Image: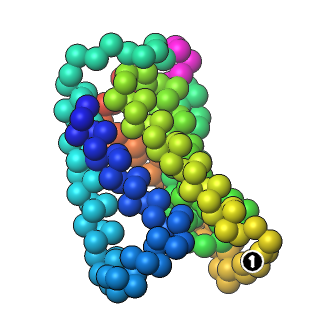
Amino acid sequence: MGILSAGLAVFFAVHLIPSFTGLRENLIQRLTFNGYRGVFTLLAIAALIATIWGFADAWHGDYAPWYIAPSWGRHVTMLLMLPVFPLMVASQLKGNITRVTKHPLINATKLWALAHLFANGEPYSVLLFGSFLVWAIIVRLSIARRERGTRPVHNYPDAMRNDVISVILGALLYGLFVWKLHSILIGVPIIT
């Protein structure tokens, strides 16, 4: 699980830099904005590859579960995953969903991580999903602290259309993941 832990540590360290405004600004001054963005991207991609590789490696290891997922855990996971895909799409198609949830991708990450903790009790799964959950909570609190006292008004021109597209496309993606994509991409079928 060393590769998984290292990948997650680098991934979250890189993604927490924007939470520390002074650090981010210092790095941009030293590297220029494009240099900062390039280093950020390379580190994030390398960390993501290490995380995926480390998770796959740990998956084939012989680890005793930290807890046995409850029999109803799969159903809770499926229920909590319902809004994840529409929130992911809504983060790109700004509308009322974005206005109400404020940060739909962070909320999607929290739900995704929490949902998977109901179905997986192996140490590598708890490390992966638990760390994403903690990271998303920290980022959300950091953003809330920075936004305190400001009340941005967001009027998105095609809000209703974007919301409908987000829900329909999100539901379609959810259906595809349940049907086959989770099995193809992750190697674990949802419907058995």
In percent of width and height, residue 10 lies at 32, 53
Identified at 50% across, 40% down, the residue is 113
Is 68 one of the magenta-colored residues? no
In percent of width and height, residue 70 lies at 53, 15
Q: Main secondary structure of the magenta part?
A: loop
SS category of the residue bearing label 1: loop
Find the magenta span and give its range.
70-74
Residue 170 higher or lower than 192, as above or below? below
Identified at 67% across, 83% down, the residue is 157
Name the quadrant of the N terminus: top left
Identified at 23% across, 16% down, the residue is 62
The residue lying toward the viewer, choosing from 68 and 90, is 68
The residue lying toward the viewer, choosing from 49 and 186, is 49
Amino acid bearing label 1: Pro
According to the image, label 1 marks what residue? Answer: 152
- Residue 168: image quadrant is bottom right
In the image: residue 153, left or right of residue 164: right
- Residue 181: image quadrant is top left
